[in-house]
Image: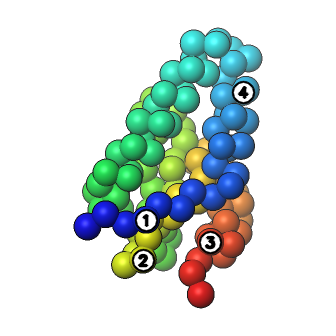
Amino acid sequence: MSRPLRIHDLVDCDVRTAERHYCKSSESLAETFRINVEAKVTDVIASPNLYGVAFDAVRFARVHRFPYLVLFEIDDIELRIYGVFHSASDPARWRDRVDDMTPE
């Protein structure tokens, strides 16, 4: 069953920030990062149940070749993508986003 999709407003900022970091090493590396994030988001949208639950109901999908995770949640109402985070980032960053987007 296809669910409506909600993407947190800061997801684009997450990707651009990481792209800038990789661009310092190589423009092609930054482009590869962006392409891999887009591919992973597409995979999440197509098959969200393939990914494990990590924190309460929040799931994560690893970005190929990079230490980044797409964090998201699915329920009967919708699919919510919270962000693209470095795997070593502070969990408080994404937990605030979960609180921002949780349906009442």
**Is the C-beta separation of discs 2 and 3 under 8 Å?**
no
Q: Position of residue 55 (x, y in %)?
A: 50, 70
Q: Nearer the viewer, residue 102 or 84?
A: 102
Mark 3 belongs to which amino acid?
Answer: Met
Give the residue number, with chain letter if any, for mark 3.
101
Residue at coordinates 54% horizontally, 38% vertically from top-left?
Answer: 67
User: CA separation, marks 4 and 3?
Assistant: 27 Å
Side of 29 where 77 appears, left or right: left
Residue at coordinates 31% horizontally, 51% vertically from top-left?
Answer: 46
**What SS does tag 3 mark?**
helix
Q: Position of residue 91 (x, y in %)?
A: 65, 62
Give the residue number, with chain letter if any, for mark 1.
4
Disc marking residue 21: 4
- Residue 31 seen by the camera: yes
Residue at coordinates 69% horizontally, 18% vertically from top-left?
Answer: 23
Q: Earlier in the sequence, mark 2 or mark 3?
A: 2
Q: Nearer the viewer, residue 82 or 93?
A: 82
Give the residue number, with chain letter if any, for mark 2.
77
Q: Nearer the viewer, residue 92 or 44?
A: 44
> How crowded is the residue under tag 4: few (<14 C-alpha within 10 Å), some, or many (20+)?
some
Q: Earlier in the sequence, mark 1 or mark 3?
A: 1
**What SS does tag 2 mark?**
loop
Q: Position of residue 63 (x, y in %)?
A: 46, 39
Q: Earlier in the sequence, mark 2 or mark 1?
A: 1
User: CA separation, marks 1 and 4?
Assistant: 32 Å
> How crowded is the residue under tag 1: few (<14 C-alpha within 10 Å), some, or many (20+)?
few
**Is the C-beta separation of discs 2 and 1 under 8 Å?**
yes
Mark 2 belongs to which amino acid?
Answer: Ile
User: CA separation, marks 2 and 3?
Assistant: 12 Å
* Residue 24 higher or lower than 92, as above or below: above
User: CA separation, marks 4 and 2?
Assistant: 35 Å
* Residue 39 higher or lower than 69, as above or below: above
